[in-house]
Amino acid sequence: MSVKKEAAVAIKNIHKEFILPQSKNSTFKQTVVNIVKKNKKVTQKVLDGISFEIDKGDFFGIVGRNGSGKSTLLKLIAGVYTPTAGEIQINGGLTPFIELGVGFNPELSGRDNVYLNGALLGFNRKQMDSMYNEIVDFAELQPFMDQKLKNYSSGMQVRLAFSIAIKAKNEILIFDEVLAVGDEAFQRKCLDVFDDYKAIGQTVILVTHDMATVKKFCNRAALINEGKVTKIGNPIEVANEYSRLNQIAIDAQTGKKQQVSEESAKKPNIFLSLTKYGVKANSFAVNDIADLKITWDSDIVADRLLVDLYKKSGEQVSNFISSREGIKTLIGKNSVELQMTLNLAPGSYYYSLGLWTKDFKRKLTSVSPVGEFTVTKDYSRAPHEFAGTTLIEHKWKSS
């Protein structure tokens, strides 16, 4: 019989609305006119009946596309906003790291801002004295602590804010897109801290667009879409559902661009169709199979077709040659299909092609780039994550 854990945060039927005026009062006259006219206002509904609990010891992920309401929810939990309706219960001290610059005064020094933030979090000066050196050491900002904060770069500010958040220890920690800023070394430091939190059972609420981080650290997660919780529980399932929604949006956004690529491909009498499971697509998950169908006018008598694949940054990933890979000649044909397993790291890719005579003696026509696609951070169809561009087939042996 499982014992129910104690809730660290209980979110009960939360609604949040913002009232948006239709007209701006830029002058005194405009203000008077709008009062007389009873300036109409629009209600923007951001959260619509959100309910769930975060248990003590949870490393809880909250994911959702931009505009879904997740950052508003964090600000409600942190007490920055009050809900329009519903209730949030917090059981324990809470440290929020939800927005760069909140609680900072740019006219004060880094040192003074450490003590100011500590006071806002409920710590007295003696407690902050005991934490100060650890905070500065972690942030690696010793030479800059007596400079005004307005002279700090955004990366320096976020390092200082994150250091305060993790060293000014509390029962519940909230992080909003902490990995979206800072350099690679700082991000690695953050991940090391997350490893420690997971090991000791620290209660953490994490908002991120990085699904690999959700899958690695979170034991539970929730997906928010259009102000509602649409999936909650297993972090891998939640992350995969987020990736699916994101992929739909990517397809919609890049559809016009792909259409332009196809139109440009038709000029040299070539037509392209990139599909996934028989449906036209421009975005794929890691290890998805992409089908590229290429058709050309019958008056082009080609012996072979060459397709080159590149990262968006310009590095060549691979190439495919019909005569090398199973089709001796294309003479008498005017279409071919290339099926690719996209064992590729997440990112943007493009491809070019050329139709050639036998032995590559003459190029009949070519297009570069002819099309592009995106590989998303969805590893649900792959048993691995990437460091690099592709996973090389390999075997280990031990003597």
Image (cartoon, rainbow, N blue to C red):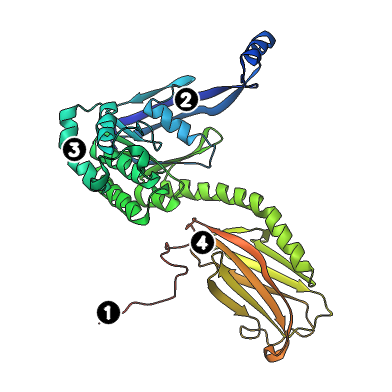
Which of the labelled discs sits on residue 398, or is there none? 1
Element at label 2? strand
Work out how far the residue at label 4 is from the one at label 3, CA to CA, in angstroms: 43 Å
Disc 2 vs disc 3: which is toward the camera?
Answer: 3
Disc 1 vs disc 2: which is toward the camera?
Answer: 2
Disc 3 vs disc 1: which is toward the camera?
Answer: 3
Cβ–Cβ under 8 Å for marks 4 and 3: no
User: Considering only order in the chain, which callout, 1 or 4, is on the residue closer to the N terminus?
Assistant: 4
What residue sits right under mark 3 in the picture? 131
Residue 170: x and y in percent read 25, 34
Q: Where, by quadrant of the figure, is residue 281 drawn?
A: bottom right
- Density class for disc 3 (Cα within 10 Å; few <14, some 14-19, many ≥20) is some
Work out how far the residue at label 4 is from the one at label 2, CA to CA, in angstroms: 36 Å
Amino acid type for the residue under numbered disc 3: Met
What residue sits right under mark 4 in the picture? 286
Amino acid type for the residue under numbered disc 4: Val
> Can you say whether 180 is above or below 366 in the image?
above
> Can you say whether 186 is above or below 50 in the image?
below
Q: Is residue 269 left or right of residue 257?
A: right
Name, please, the residue furthest toward the top: 36
What residue sits right under mark 2 in the picture? 14
Q: Nearer the viewer, residue 64 or 136?
A: 136
Q: Is residue 398 left or right of residue 260?
A: left
Cβ–Cβ under 8 Å for marks 2 and 3: no
Work out how far the residue at label 1 is from the one at label 2, CA to CA, in angstroms: 57 Å
Residue 58 visible in the shown view: no
Q: Quadrant of the N terminus?
A: top left
User: Considering only order in the chain, which callout, 2 or 4, is on the residue closer to the N terminus?
Assistant: 2
